[in-house]
Amino acid sequence: MLDTPAEAEFDDVVRVLSAFCETPVSVISFVSSDRQWFKAKAGFEPSETPIIQSICAHGILESGVFEISDTTQDPRTADNPLVAGDPNVRFYAGAPLETQDGLPLGMVCVLDIKPRVLSDAQKELLRVMARQVMNQLELRLTLKRERAARNEAEALLASSTALLAQNEMLRREVDHRVKNSLQQVAGFLQLQERRTQGPAAALLSAARGRVDTVVQVHDHLHRHADGDFVRADEFLKNLCGSMAGNSPPGVSLEIEADPIELRSDRIMALGLAANELISNAMKHAYKGRTGTIQVSLRKTADEATLTVADSGDGLPATFDASAAQGLGLRVIGMLASQLHGTLTQSSEPGRTAFVLRFPIGEIS
């Protein structure tokens, strides 16, 4: 994981933690011998710090949630440069990232510039999110091992049947565990969403939608993947069918999609981008009126175009998707970059459309 690019599923974790724990800073930190490196961070600029500045290095030595209510009063942190100087950290709480063998890799943590104590619900969310991060890592490792095992099985024809059967059993077990974990996170977010009001509730709702989309992507990959490729049109139709059940009263979804095959590692970005665009249209396009959201996936030569359009209230004349500060559009912009694509928008009387264009072929 060290020095890998930012990824939406980990960025969502820190955003939800900051919103629910009401802390200005949250990070996913991996601790190595000479530094701590941040896979995801909210409210904190550096991508890594020297190990001497790592509070997480103390946290991974403890079991359960590690909390320091006032860092200036704890001998382990009082002389830490992050406490004694800028940014003047005064509070720290984190849950360890542990392998199935109990080896600590780092922490999921929140920080504040004032002393405080987390509630029981906030501590439980830290634990849940730490487990979710580890489930993602274990899944990636398992899928990597499975792919290597499948390649070996093709070379060793004599033992391929038994080996593939073993891999299928392993895959089903991983599917079951990961799906249960994702559904647990979605349920927890839904519960907290009902108890929360204001901007934090909107963040929790958006995060729950992204988790639901990841569940669908994961399920579709293992039900319909043909080798390394997946039918993007079939997946998008299934996603729209699921989202239609949660659309506002009087708002319907229409989907048209050309047969397109994409590498399985790109379906996640496409699914999350479609989820964000459709969710934004559901929220803002009609505002209590009836209408239709039209979704299309078209193929032209070596390029695919995802379009989400409506005939609702339209966009402000000064709106620019590339400069928007909203969380949803920033996420879409990041997903467009992962697809090596571009996001544009148009708004005229009777039609507003967001268009994501991206190449279909191999990306070097």
Image (tube, rainbow, N blue to C red):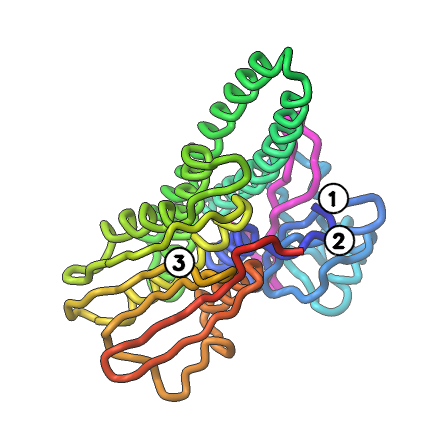
Q: Nearer the viewer, residue 147 or 157?
A: 157
Q: Residue at x 36, y 56 (%)?
A: 205
Q: Quadrant of residue 59?
A: top right
SS class, disc 1? helix
- How far across and down, in percent of the image, does residue 181 sit? 46, 35
Quadrant where the C terminus sits is bottom right
Relative to residue 238, is residue 288 drawn left or right?
left
Which mark, residue 77? 2
Height in image: 282 above or below 223?
Answer: below
Specify the segment rendered in magenta. Answer: 94-118
Residue at 27% over, 70% down: 310
**Residue 133, position in %: x, y?**
57, 42
- Identify residue type, mark 1: His
- Give the mark nearer the N terminus: 1 vs 3: 1
Q: Which residue is mark 3?
A: 274
Asked if the magenta segment contains residue 237, the reply would be: no
Residue 268, position as x, y percentages in the image: 49, 49
Badge 3 amino acid: Ala
Q: Which residue is mark 1?
A: 58
- Label 2 to label 1: alpha-carbon separation: 9 Å
Q: Earlier in the sequence, mark 2 or mark 1?
A: 1
Q: Where does the image place residue 38, in percent across and percent down from the top left?
A: 68, 54
